[in-house]
Amino acid sequence: MSSFKVALLQHEYTSTEIERRIIEQAGGQLVDTDILPEAERLPAAAEADAIIVRWLNVTPGIIRRLHRCRIIVRYGVGYDNVHYEAATTAGIMIGHCPHYCLDEVATHALALLLGCIRGITTSHAMLAAGSWSQGPFFRVSRMAGRTLGIVGLGNIGSALARKLGGWGLRLLAHDPFVEPEQVASAGVTLVEFETLLREAHYISLHVPLLPETHHLISERAFALMKPGVILVNTARGPIVDEAALLAALGDGKVAAAGLDVFEREPLPTDSPLRRHPRLLLSNHMAWYSEDAEAELHRSVAEEAIRVCTGGLPVALANPEVLHKLGRFHEWKPTWNARWRWKRAAAMKTEG
């Protein structure tokens, strides 16, 4: 007889054999609700000790139906689709995987940045249409000597900074909760957000989606930026006000932008973003490599097992819950967890 039960909810992966093998070897039972009729999925998960989700919006109503759940683990770095307050109030930990695709996302951000700087989409479209020109058919500026602003100096923002450390760029970063050792290891200069907007030629976004980062890049932010700035977003779509971005592209304030994430996903087929000649787009795939996907499947299973067998997750998104559980003294936070805890404490202080 299995000692604990783990339920997968709305993951849409073609295979979950990695999770099944790891969980069953630890003495647990895996219930993949994706193979069940829709009406049976939540009832099948109601008595699970751990829930693993990917796309599902885990609402307070869903959380109230999880009678035995100790942890909700999300496939991914972010956890904005899990209702934070409801899970914490219910005494349920929120786990996520903040380390599984650091190299992939940082590399993808760099690829989008280089594609925009060098005008790759414009050149490709011209050749695909049968044209050829060796003249200056669009503006390209030298990259060396320019300033890159990194908004959010977490694991991915720091990885991007380290990748670009020898490229002749001035590296600025903004993060109100960053640890001093993070700044030193990334080789950046920490500045205020408005300073970064004014001085950066290139801006790359690496912040989580939170109430205070929704539309962080807005009409006001674009107004502060240098003319001809290049913007890259591999974080979360709603961090950028897409209407304001289109307007900034239209008036020349933004020379180009590389987007992997969007306010609405999948990106609507009639979205004007799809047709803009100075946008380089990808389909929320910055996280992906075969290596990263295997690591993700392994990580969520291992996090579920840790909690189901009496431990704490490596990456705990809601450490406040440990006060409710009488286990705060056991918490040994990662850098990302300390960032989240600092932010929560600051918001409580500010009321």
Image: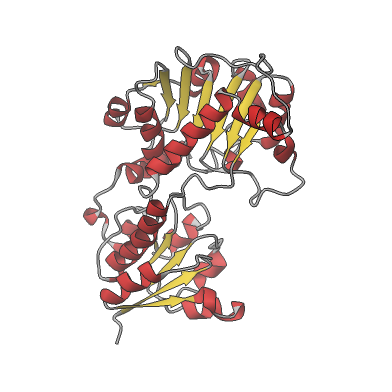
Judge left or right: residue 117 versus residue 291: right
Q: Residue at x 52, y 26 (%)?
A: 203
Query: Where is residue 59 drawn, in percent x and y?
Result: 55, 63
Q: 146 or 191, which is in the foreground?
A: 146
Q: Residue at x 41, y 40 (%)?
A: 343
Does 134 sit left or right of 271 as displayed? left
Give the answer, above or below, for where 62 lies relative to 144. Answer: below
Work out whether 55 lies above or below 247: below
Quarter containing the N terminus: bottom left
Asked whether, in this view, residue 128 is left or right of residue 192, the answer is: right
* Closer to the camera in the image, 104 or 38: 104
Q: Where is residue 238 in the image (x, y as percent from the top left)?
A: 60, 42
Residue found farthest to the right: 270
Front-most of residues 260 and 115: 115
329 left or right of 125 in image:
left
Q: Position of residue 339 (x, y in %)?
A: 36, 40
Q: In which quarter of the image is residue 26?
A: bottom left
Residue 262 point in image, percent of width and height: 62, 43
Q: Residue at x 22, y 54 (%)?
A: 329
Residue 186 visible from this viewpoint:
yes
